[in-house]
Structure formats: C-alpha cells, structure tokens
Image (cartoon, rainbow, N blue to C red):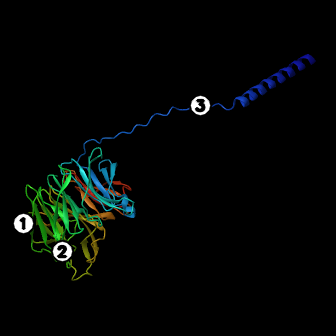
Amino acid sequence: MLADRRSRAARRVSRALAAASVVTALAVQGPAHAAEPILQTEESDIVTLPPGGPHRVLVEDGVYRHSKDGRVYVVDLDTGRLLGMVQAAYNANMVADPAGKAFYVAETTWERGNRGKRHDMLAAYDPRTLEQIADIDLPGRALITPKKPDMAIGADGHYVYVYDSSPTNAVHVYDTGLKSVVRTVDVPGCALIYPWGNAGFSSICGDGSLANVQMDAKGTPALTRTPPFFVPDRDPVFEHSPEIAASGHVWFISYSGLIYEATLGAQSSIAKPWSIQEAAGLKAASDARAPFEVTWRPGGWQLAALRARDSHLFVLMHKGTFWTHKDAGSELWELDLKTHRLVRRIPLAARSMMVGVTQDAQSRIMLTDEAGDLMVLDGADGKPVRKIGALGDALIFTAAPGE
C-alpha cells in the first residue's frame, strides 16, 4: 500500500515537472507568429464605361459652399449609380457634343489657390474613359454665377462658344477639330449664347433685343440686331430659357410667365408671347408694374426643360410676388408648346431649383432639393421612379443626350 502511494506521488511529480518544462520552453521561444503576407504590387488602370444610352446624363454640381471644388457627374438614371466625375472648378460651365463624342468643361483656377496668375481653361473629356482629350487656355471667360448660356455648342459639335465680359462683351469660338480658339467675336451690350445651326449664335442685349452672329466658311462673323421684344426693367426674360440648337429655336420665358418663341438666324424673329398662367386657365400674371400680386410664377435656376420630340415644356412654378424669380418650384407644370395648353401639374415632394428631361420615348425627369438629392420621375406620368440620395452639394445643371 505504501509502495503504491509512493508510486502515484512520483508520477504526479513527474507530470508537473514535464508541464513546467513545456511552459519554460514556450517562454524562451516566445509567442508563435503567422507568416508575413506577400503584398501584391498595385497596378493602376482605366475603367472604360460601356456605350451610354439616353438615360446616362451629366449633372453639374456647383458646390457653392466651397465652389473651387465644383464637379460634373456622370449618372445612370436607370440604376441610380454615379459612374464617374470630373473637376469643374469655380463657377464652371459644361456642354456635351450632340453626337456624344465628348463633353466640355470651362473652368478657372489660380496658381496660388486663391491668388496668383489666373487660368481660364477649356477641357474636353472622353465620355467613356473620362480622360482629357483636349486641354487649352482660354483668352478669358465670364467669371460670374454659373449661367448655362455662358457656354454653348453648335448643332454639329464643330464650334464651342464661351462668353467673356472682360474687357468687353465677347464670345470666344473654339474649333473642336483644330482644338484651338479660332476667333473672338465682339457682342457689345449683349450677353450669353444661344446657338443656331452649325456656325451661328444669338445673344440677349441690354435693350431687350437680340444680337445675331453668323460666321461664313472662313469664320468671318457678320452681326445683325432685332428690335427689342421685351422690356428689361418691366418683365425680363430668364437666362436659362430652353433652346434647340439644330433648329435655332429658343423659348424665352419672362419673369411674369410669358413665353416668347424665337426662331434664331441671321434675321431672328420672335412670335407674339403667350401666358403660362392662361394656358392653365388662370389670369395672366402681373409684371413689375404690379409687383405685389401673388400668383403662380416661374422660378428657380435651371427652371425649365424641353422635350423636343413632342414639344413639351417643363417649368418649375411657385406662388409668389413678381420679384420671386429665384424661388424654388413647388410644382412642375408640363405645357404643350404647339397648342399652348397645360398638360399637367405635378406637385413636388420637395421644392426644386432645377429640372431636366431626357429626350427618348421612355423619358425621365430630373429634379433636385436642398440636400443635393437627384429625384427621377417618369416622363409619361410624372410619378417617382427613384431618388439618388446626396448626389452633390448644389446641383445646378443637367445635360442629356440629344438635347
């Protein structure tokens, strides 16, 4: 019995000594480490987008809280995806080639950030790779709150026009084939650019008339003027009135809600205006002579969009007095330009400063709100399709294929 107890005690001591040896060995060797991973060399590449359809659009973000960071987004309205973006620094403007070959951004920078030598530039981008395919210095550009007609493109995409106001009112003509500015055309007392055909444009003048510039085969300009068709201090027209370069038509919308259809050319003509409110069965709105009358009025930034295939005009409307032309729209009115009739009124879930529309048979309407969301509506019935949340900071312009 005693021998058995001594044998069991000896085995316990032996096991304890063995365990102590293992602990000591681990302490000497230290903790075990996994093998270091082999890092792969990072290789940059360029993603090429597939060919775009009618619902791949450009949306400009002014980023007004820090506008040197402006940008242009490439957006797919069908999936709600942001496909890419390019820089559009400080009160930039953009236009898209009518055939989809490129899009152009005019922008301004300074060598030392907020000072130093100023650079006015025009960049051309490949719409599928977003690579720059041209990057030139401009003689200048009008550095003001972005207005869509500060820049325009001709019907065949050969000329891009950039408005300048220093030292005088002028338009720089950029040849997309030569990739250079080939001419500067003076438009004294006039501003903005509404292109017609392949080598002509008109500008709005301070007396309510239009200046028409036609360039011949050598690019030599000839200028004509129309009589005044509106009274600027009584009922001005919106700069962002929609137009069709191919046919040379502009529908100038006045602050009170009159629509002037202009057929642009070397001898532009303007039809008798008609009232948006009367098209809706209401009384025509007052102008600046009765500024406190509250009624439905057009307003916003890109406040109107045209669907050319059926001549339907979409206008943001709000209730207000005469000088509320910058107020966001609470409703979207769809008008038939052929019959001068209201098609429908679409109440908006959120007030919008911008409306755009695609040109296809299954068209989409684009709206925005203060949060920088992009709302997409069905162009047939005005019902919501999707919301692209927080797309940008200050969405101001759109460009859809075929505009």
The crowding category of the residue bearing disc 1, from other C-alpha atoms within 10 Å (few below 14, some 14 to 19, many at least 20), is some
User: Foreground: 385 or 74?
Assistant: 74
For residue 115, what is the image quadrant?
bottom left
Amino acid type assigned to the residue bearing label 3 in the image:
Ala
Which label was assigned to residue 65?
Answer: none
For residue 6, what is the image quadrant?
top right
Are dots 1 and 2 in contact, CB under 8 Å?
A: no
Are dots 3 and 2 in contact, CB under 8 Å?
A: no
- Residue 133 pos. (x, y %): 26, 47
**Sequence-wise first label, 3 or 2:** 3
Amino acid type assigned to the residue bearing label 2 in the image:
Gly
The crowding category of the residue bearing disc 3, from other C-alpha atoms within 10 Å (few below 14, some 14 to 19, many at least 20), is few
Give the number of the mark in front: 3 or 2: 2
Amino acid type assigned to the residue bearing label 1 in the image:
Gln
Please tell me which residue is depicted at 30% across the width and 58% down the height of the picture: 107
CA separation in Å, label 1 and label 2: 18 Å
Please tell me which residue is depicted at 20% across the width and 53% down the height of the picture: 180
Residue on which disc 3 sits: 34
Residue on which disc 2 sits: 206
**Left or right, 41 with reference to 310:** right
Which label was assigned to residue 267?
Answer: 1
- Residue 196 pos. (x, y %): 12, 59
Disc 2 is placed on an element classified as loop
Can residue 1 be seen in this snapshot? no
Are dots 3 and 1 in contact, CB under 8 Å?
A: no
The crowding category of the residue bearing disc 2, from other C-alpha atoms within 10 Å (few below 14, some 14 to 19, many at least 20), is some
